[in-house]
Amino acid sequence: MSVEVLVSKPATALAPAEAIMKEQLRPSSHGGKQNNHVKVSSGYPGQIVHYPVEANRNTSDVNGLGTDIQQHFDNTHIIYDNSTDTTFLRGRLLGKGGFARCYEILNLNTNKIYAGKIISKTRISKPHQKQKILREVQLQKNLKHRHVVEFINYFEDDSNVYIILENCSRKSLVHVLKHRKYLTEPEVRYYLRQLVAGVEYIHSNQIIHRDLKLGNMLLNNEMDLKLADFGLATKVDFAGEKKMTVCGTPNYIAPEVLQKKGHSFEADIWAVGCIMYALLVGRPPFETTTLKETYLRITENNYSFPSSLTTAAKNLIRKCLHPEPTSRPLLQEILADEFFVCGYLPHSLSPTCCTAMPKFPSRYASNRPMSYAAAREPTVDHLGQLGNAISQMHLDSRSENLLEEKELEDIEKKSPQHSRTHIENSVQTRDTHKNGNNSNERHIDERSKSPSQRDLTKPGCAAVLLNALTLCLEQMPKDFKNSPAPVNAEITWVTKWVDYSNKYGFGFQLSSDALGVLFNDTSRIIMAPDGRAIQYYDVTSKLSAFTSDCVPDELERKTTLLQYFARYMDEHLINGGDLEYSSSSDSVSWSGSLFLKKWFRTAKAIVMYLSDGTLQVNFFDDHTKLILSSNRGDYLVTYIDQERVARTYNLAHIRQEGSVLDIYERITFAKSMLKNLVDIEGADI
């Protein structure tokens, strides 16, 4: 692939849209990890400029980090803005999104801290990805309001695109609720008034946010609320225009968005109602264990209140969550509601409110909301095969893999017309345990084998892995100082996934580049890394093999769905870690025998179990991953940290030498998840 590298002076940070697309968003020529220095354009291609870092002894503590601010930043990670001749130091990671990572960054000219949204050019090489970044910049750069995160600058170097934003040091309302569980009514009025002010401002600029949620409500040092993340925002071009794109975060999506009836500013009012409910109760109003049930409740307007909520609070929430968009209140009507007029509204809040309940005068104290567990209604466990062991699963509304989707039916209508020549000869039914020997008479039902017929002693068996993890956790040293030396080993793991189980199933991509879908009816389809060979297992595990240019009539729909999942993951998702995989022989040796076998969610993670016994756990909060796999009689532990750096260890070495606390805690969690699977599914899943 030819890559154009920018070697001339970059365009200014706030260039017109056309200039940004042509000059600012060119793909990077650097495909690997970033070095501890930054390549910049400085007169000739490829020059590496090292900027010396000297202490800027500013006596004013404007950032709350002491007078020597630079000691809190890594002076080996330097960012240079050529358009303004500004040098930044990169600090701690604040969060991650689908394409970007957000860091604290220090302006060495002013000693002021900002939030730096850093997007690797390797992740925005496709036109629609560039367009998404451009849209976000164009919408946010002109917004100036006390309750909207301030846009500072936008620039690039050879490797990355940088969006510099106001830093909100007290994080988001998600973090507040994590400590507090629920808030008092005076606090909710305080935050809601500021939220309404921010939303009213962007609406006056003809912008619909479309992703209002607790995680996008940030707090600065003064406890001012700021609207953040305009990645899904859109501009209304004419009065009465309705947007049709299905996007947002599941728990906060308005019914008209889900039903594709066309939506406008009223969708943000719906989200305000969801946020108000979540702050008072501790969870969004429609949250359930599955997307399907959540969407059903949204479309049916099915939610309930804990008895401890005041009548005024309930009434305002009902108004905001009215199923008819035009019947929802205007933003100014929200502030004029009885909930605000007749209740105490503090002028300010102490930062201690982030972790502890404030002490208001007794006459202003509100009724205590019911806890999360007590408030939620009984829900159906749609992963019945896992039973009560995982019945407390939540929908993870933070997952970037869930929405911003096109309807699959639209693609099915346009599905390619495959050749019908000799289709009957392209479908082969084979015994999957006979090394590929064809048989049109027989098939293997994997589930029909009893545990006694299987080898429970070989690595890859769930019972053996569970025993190995148990012994490791019991016997390993518990000082948590160091991990053993990493080992060189190649593993297969799930690099991308898409949860569309509310309608079709769960899509996945392996590190080998093989792709598959585990359909809701328990059938599955797998496509080879080269995109040609396809294997389909029906609900009885009967195997049909064919090629992408010769698809049987009865499998055309599921093959089209597979191709959609593949295209979606390719265009919208990035690999889950920097873990190399050698695929030189995949096209020759691929057999389709390795696939996703089981998966489920908990409030903390998504758990995936592969057909070779590999157990993978992706943690939602920090995006770390733990992969447990077998290799030549040994078990391997691969840990992918917050920086997407992967290290693989021998489980036996961890058992003997111990590990750092992060790995110990994740192995402990993985063991409990595996035990749930074994208890429900049997020793050899």
Image (cartoon, rainbow, N blue to C red):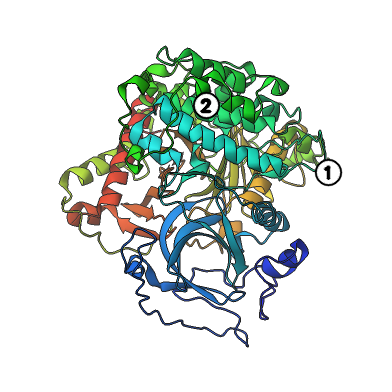
Q: Secondary structure at mark 2?
A: loop
Query: Where's the C terminus, which quadrant?
Result: top left
Quarter of the view holding residue 417: top right
Residue named by callout 2: 290
Q: Is residue 58 left or right of residue 470?
A: right
Question: Which residue is the extreme one toward the bottom?
Answer: 44
The type of residue carrying mark 2 is Thr
Of 343 and 625, nearer the camera is 343
Total labels drawn: 2
Which mark is drawn over residue 419? Answer: 1
Instruction: Mark 1: give few (<14), some (14-19) or many (20+) Cα within 10 Å.
Output: few
Tell me which residue sits at (16%, 50%) in the image: 478
Tell me which residue sits at (76%, 27%) in the image: 261
Of 286 and 518, nearer the camera is 286
CA distance for labels 2 and 1: 38 Å
Mark positioned earlier in the residue sequence (2 or 1): 2
The type of residue carrying mark 1 is Ser
Tell me which residue sits at (46%, 70%) in the image: 110
Query: Where's the N terminus, which quadrant?
Result: bottom right
Residue 83, position in %: x, y?
62, 74
Of 6 and 363, nearer the camera is 363
Is residue 638 visible in the rendered structure shown here? Answer: yes
Q: Is residue 467 left or right of residue 405?
A: left
Tell me which residue sits at (50%, 16%) in the image: 312
Of 453 and 603, nearer the camera is 603
CB within 8 Å, label 2 to label 1: no
Q: Secondary structure at mark 1?
A: loop
Residue 10, position in %: x, y?
66, 75
Q: Is residue 658 left or right of residue 594?
A: left
